[in-house]
Image: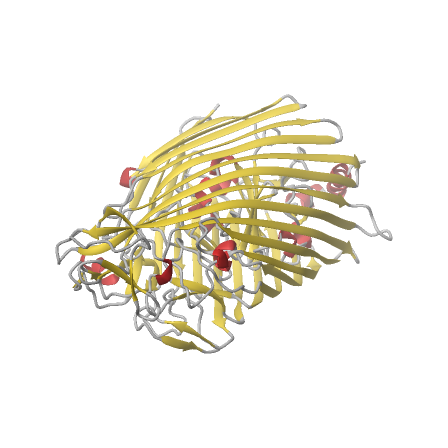
Amino acid sequence: MTRLSALKSALLATCALLPTAAFAQQTLQTIEVVGVSPVQGSEIAKDKIPSNVETIGARELDHSRAPTLLDSILQSVPGVSLSDQTGNAFQRDLNYRGQTASPVLGTPQGIAVYQNGARINEAFGDVVNWDLIPEMAIARMTLMPNNPLFGLNATGGAMSIEMKNGFTYQGGEAQLFGGSFGRVQSGAQYGWNNGAYSAYIAAEGAYDRGWRDYSSASQIRRMYADFGARGDNTEFHLSFTGADNKLGSVAATPIEMLNQRWSSVYTWPQSLHLQMQMVQASAKWTPTDTLSIQANGYYRNYKSARVDGNGTEVQDGGGVFVLEDAAGTPWDINRNGPTANTLAADAALGQIDRNTVKTDSYGGSLQATSTTQLFGHDNHFVVGASVDHGNTNFQATSELGTLDNNLFVTGLGVYIDQPNAGLAPVNLNAKNTYLGIYATNTFDITSQLALTAGGRFNWAQINLRDQTGFAPLLNSNNNFQRFNPVVGLTYKITPDMTAYAGYSEANRAPTPLELGCSDPANPCLIDNFLIADPPLKQVVSRTVEGGLRGEISGGRSAYAADLPAYRKAPIKSVAVDDGWRLRWGLSLFRTENSDDILQVVDPLNPVRGYFKNAGTTLRQGVEAKVDLAWNRWTAYANYTFIDATFRSAFDVNDPFLRVPLGVVSGNHIPGIPAHRLKLGAEYAVTDAWKVGASVNYVGSQYLLHDETNVYPKVPAYWVVNVNTSYQVTKNVEVFGLIQNLFNQRYYSAGTVFDPAGFNTAGGGTAFALNDPRSMVPGMPLAAYAGIRAKF
């Protein structure tokens, strides 16, 4: 008898013994399973996980409730907030417990992200491009804190994304929606199987012109396909993910300009072109009811091309253009000789920075899962190994240009190339290999008490090679290794309440970008340039977590005889109209990072900077949540408090004052709001018509690059969203939603910048400002409507 059959028989037998009247008041508790490693097949009951793990399914990713994948995650997962560095809804940062998964090169990445067991943190900077994930094809997402089995970057947690296939999704669906700012988005999916073979395909497209002045339109094109086969003891899948996206970016704007016009931008053009193709293969073999072997492999090709209009360090040097080095010595902007300055004296100077990243990466995992009893007690054992290899070519150039009155940069065809001033084209090859070996075991000491213990050994090799022949000091070989343990307990205090506590460690190796830009004497134009630098230390996190979670229910219910596959979905009761269910959770966490990596600006040229180890940082806090389903109502409330501080003293450079300032223990880490509150409810007015609303409150946060906490904070804000849907027929639904119902003006993020203005061709200054605060404004009221059809 299989584990699933035994569980089903036991539940049915228990129900048969209950008196009819008693059963009318008894609601069977949900049994939900989650993976303990990136590879599917390691699933265990969520109640035995010694951390505050969160899951969301396809229903929560529905566009009738939120317009993008990140908005859906924000609405559904407690503790998550979004910040914005690009001014693009498809390219925002996901923040969880003070750690980030961001698409912006140079942002320290503290969350590991996997798609069907394949690591999708890009090899060069560990960035996460959320827009490359076909959201319609997502079956389930799991956010797992306090678990080193997810490898590098899991210092703040890990996100595991499980995609649909023809065995888990059948039928077809098409949807179309659009609305404010020219948004038009469509998608279709279809799944089929005959028991032995399956097929699934999904395709999505979107267009959004953006709401900021001069912002380039965003175009999204992505798809996912999966072909599967299975027998009595085996299952095999071959999948393909592809995307070709063009994204406009407008970034932060000085607050003085936003006070005059909310949609204004500061220097442009700014655009990004992303292309990705990934092929994955996975297999599962179950020789016995208690043993399964899982394996997967992938190949990923990734390309990005960025164009960014900026200010420039170029000055007039008496009829020729010059650059100054750190000592103030002027150099011709090109190593081949002087470049004449023939521009009008009042022409404002700028530059167009371009960079490309081309990466081929591949890897795979092999894993075994055993549920054989140990000493007569239930036991869940997982052991595995993974390898990931990336080969990246990074190139960057800067073209001298002029700015017009709208701050648009027009290139002059003159390229900046002066190594003596620390600024030259870059052509870098980076190879990184990550190896991991892991094991974990969950042992039921009693029917109520379970012990989890395990760990993972990470080995990382990162080699850099200059391809220009002019920067040999950039060449380096770097190795990092560490064993990270995890241990935890769960205790079922009552059938409806569980207590848990755990301790874990994780590490993050410096990225090739960080290793190539860590010398204060040779700062880089972040996201553009690398030069010869000293090595950085790896980041090590130590997390302690504890909490309570529970579920209570009442009213009449019926047992679902059609149990889904044990690996795939929860076993649930079917509630009728007068039933109710309340889920709740409370957790405390404390994560200490040693040798945390920080981005520091150069005091002489604030548009450039470098990375440094900044000693110890601390992120600690509380997470509380409650979810209610009652009659025609569903509602949720969750609150997160995060105290994120530096615990070591070190110096940083102020972009405005252009002098070193001392950070002391207790200063707060910029960009991390202390308070996050989310409230939401949905009501079924009729069987066909639903209406809902949500409120998202985000507390104040310090500006980026304000590590000494001397500037006014980014103010707290709240946003109200509403949604409605109507089931026209069994297969056709229409829906609508409004984001930022009350048209609140708020800032989603902010940074300190140098408001001194731009050099002119005659040696003067143009477009000078006074306030050193630069903000990313939040999107104003936006309305969308759509239709979905199933077939």
Would residue 297 be visible to someone looking at this image?
yes
| Residue found farthest to the right | 375
Left or right: residue 625 compared with residue 523: right
Near-viewer residue (470 or 229): 470
Q: Nearer the viewer, residue 42 or 737?
A: 42
Q: Quadrant of residue 586?
A: bottom right
The residue under the point 69% across, 39% down is 295
Q: Is residue 374 above or below residue 240?
A: below
- Looking at the image, residue 387 sits to the left or right of residue 640; the answer is right
x and y, in percent, of residue 500 in the image = 66, 61
Q: Nearer the viewer, residue 423 or 311?
A: 423
- Residue 30 visible from this viewpoint: no
Q: Image check: 37 left or right of 127?
A: right
Judge left or right: residue 44 versus residue 247. right
Tell me where residue 790 appears, x and y as whole percent: 47, 26
Q: Is residue 520 above or below residue 219?
A: below
Q: Residue furthest front?
A: 337
Q: Is residue 167 above or below residue 256?
A: above
Residue 294, image quadrant: top right
Task: Tell me which colouring the rendered structure shows.
Answer: secondary structure
Residue 783 pos. (x, y %): 30, 42
Whole-percent x, y for residue 680 in the image = 43, 51
| Quadrant in which the N terminus is drawn | top right
Number of numbered discs on residues: 0
